Amino acid sequence: MRPVVRFPDVEALTLAHLRKVIPGFQGGPDVPQDLASRLPFTTVERNGGVTRWPALDQAVLALYVYGADRATAHDRLQEVLAHLHAMPGSAPLVSRTYTIAGAQFTPDPLTDGPRWYASVGVAVRPEKGIG
């Protein structure tokens, strides 16, 4: 019988790490109503992945960075990506990170405001066995 394990919430784990390593980091899984007052703002959304049971969850995360201007949003995305790729060994349970889709300028369809996108993989080990 395979062990029963629970994997961490990769969105929450990633956001907690970014808040710890980037001073003044603003981010969450959703775009806030007061977005304009919180720029630059980064959304971290899990949009799939593969579980290699029971040892590894390979989450796919979509990153959207909103900024007051194109350059500010771009620079924040690059900072976020640099810290994400440094997570293995510094964030508990993270064993690997990798780029799926590199930086792309994708203005917000509702406001036409500056926004950059990238997609990354974050592989995590189970946080503990259950049952």
Image (cartoon, rainbow, N blue to C red):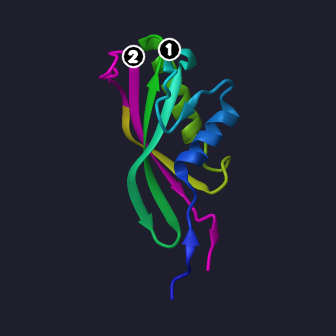
As shown in the figure, which amino acid type bears the numbered disc 1? Thr
Q: Please report the residue visible at 57 percent of the width from the left and 67 percent of the height from the top.
A: 6
**Circles 2 and 1: CB atoms closer than 8 Å:** yes
- Place of residue 64 in the rendered image (x, y in percent of width and height, measured from the top left): 43, 30
Q: Please report the residue visible at 45 percent of the width from the left and 20 percent of the height from the top.
A: 74
As shown in the figure, which amino acid type bears the numbered disc 2? Pro
- Place of residue 97 in the rendered image (x, y in percent of width and height, measured from the top left): 51, 47
Residue 46 vs 95, above or below: the answer is above
Could you say which quadrant of the image residue 27 lies in? top right
Q: Which residue is mark 1?
A: 72
**Which residues lie in the magenta part?**
103-131
Q: Is residue 34 left or right of residue 108?
A: right
Q: Which residue is mark 2?
A: 114
Label 2 neighbour load within 10 Å: few <14, some 14-19, many 20+: many
Separation (CA) of disc 2 from disc 1: 9 Å
Label 1 neighbour load within 10 Å: few <14, some 14-19, many 20+: some
